[in-house]
Image (cartoon, rainbow, N blue to C red):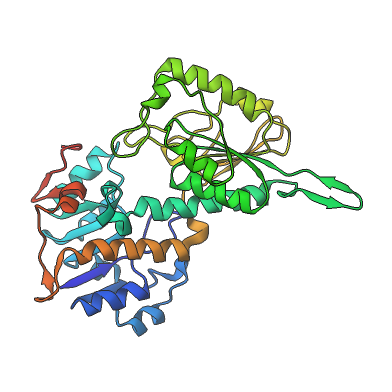
Amino acid sequence: MRIGAPKETEAGETRVAVSPETVKKFIALGAQIVVAKGAGLASGFTDADYAAAGATLGEQGEALGAEVVLKVRRPHADETTALKSGALVVAIQDPYGHTSEIEALAKSGVAAFAMELMPRITRAQVMDVLSSQANLAGYRAVIDAAAEYGRGFPMMMTPAGTVPAAKAFIMGVGVAGLQAIATARRLGAIVTATDVRPATKEQVESLGAKFVAVEDEEFKQAETSGGYAKEMSDGYKAKQATLVAAHIAKQDIVITTALIPGRPAPKLVTAAMVASMRAGSVIIDLAVERGGNCELSKANELVVSDNGVKIVGYSDVRKLASTASSLYARNLYAFVETLIDKAEKKLAVNWDDELVKATLLTRDGAVTHPNFR
């Protein structure tokens, strides 16, 4: 059983799919690990670290040609040609809106698993890449906001006068939003938050923040069985936008995290709202990869509005590459471990397993997932 960890080739991607820690764990399961030379350098893992853990260092093609290929991002077209037919490819596949790329992956004959489709059940919590990465993104968003904000976060009483606490507004209270609330509170900000899901109100208040939302009948039904936000009606959006517009005008920091699976990110912060904020305020848009929650945000750029508001649109957790890679590698190990017969020390995929069914995108030359056929 040969497991390969190629070097990520997408511009700006600094994470890696295996860590020296998980290399040791895979070897204990009977696997041989091939790590592409230099694959972990951007994450702080040297080739020597991998060699000491027992991995074999090889070329990119060797890692891509393994029976199991572990990646952060979906293989590019030039990488797909190097994949072995019948191999298992485990990564964040980003299938929504990328039909041609998924079809090309299917034609290569691999069984491709999308880790972001992992069901949110107790058994799969340790495999939840969305949660592990979003948690870090929420933390980093507040750190970035503090770095860009030209004033202090906590209230400070000095002989020269009192410095008021910063006001931070978190839009979207998923894993990233909750971590952003907790981090902003630890830094001393006055925190408010909003979300269309009624269950989040209690979570927000438990962290010491104030909940802001139009709490009508539609709001009470605004959550899917899987715990995700539903698309709201135009009427509700209008009422919520009016409330939010008045609230945003008083805020120093706005962090947006709202995403709906398979859809563009909802526009929550309009240009008019940005114009209402005072100079020096900061907006961190964590939904920028899906078009952004802020009308003015741009992917991987710092935009300064006409009235001096800073809008930051970093699309990943590249600044926390080592921690992000370590957590992601553990997520992948926890999943791949279920595909291995520990007694025989070989691959033994149970194609009827609920985790396999939920994440399997392609197999035997076809797109198999019902949402993407």
Tell which of 71 and 172 is nearer to you: 172
- Please state if 19 lies on the left or on the right of 67 as rendered: right
What residue lies at 38% left-to-right and 64% top-to-bottom?
A: 16
Residue 3 picture location, percent across and down? 22, 70
Tell which of 339 and 65 is nearer to you: 339
Residue 251's place in the image compared with 161, above or below, is above
Q: Which quarter of the figure is the C terminus placed in?
A: top left
Residue farthest to the right? 160
Residue 78 picture location, percent across and down? 26, 55
Residue 266's place in the image compared with 134, above or below, is above
What residue lies at 61% left-to-right and 49% top-to-bottom?
A: 184
What residue lies at 54% left-to-right and 41% top-to-bottom?
A: 205
Tell which of 58 and 152 is nearer to you: 152
Q: Which quarter of the figure is the N terminus placed in?
A: bottom left
Tell which of 289 and 127 is nearer to you: 127
Quadrant of the rendered image containing residue 266: top left
What residue lies at 42% left-to-right and 54% top-to-bottom?
A: 133
From this viewpoint, is residue 313 visible?
no
- Please state if 341 lies on the left or on the right of 231 as rendered: left
Residue 95 picture location, percent across and down? 27, 42
Residue 82's place in the image compared with 230, above or below, is below
- Please state if 262 lies on the left or on the right of 369 as rendered: right
Residue 357 picture location, percent across and down? 15, 48
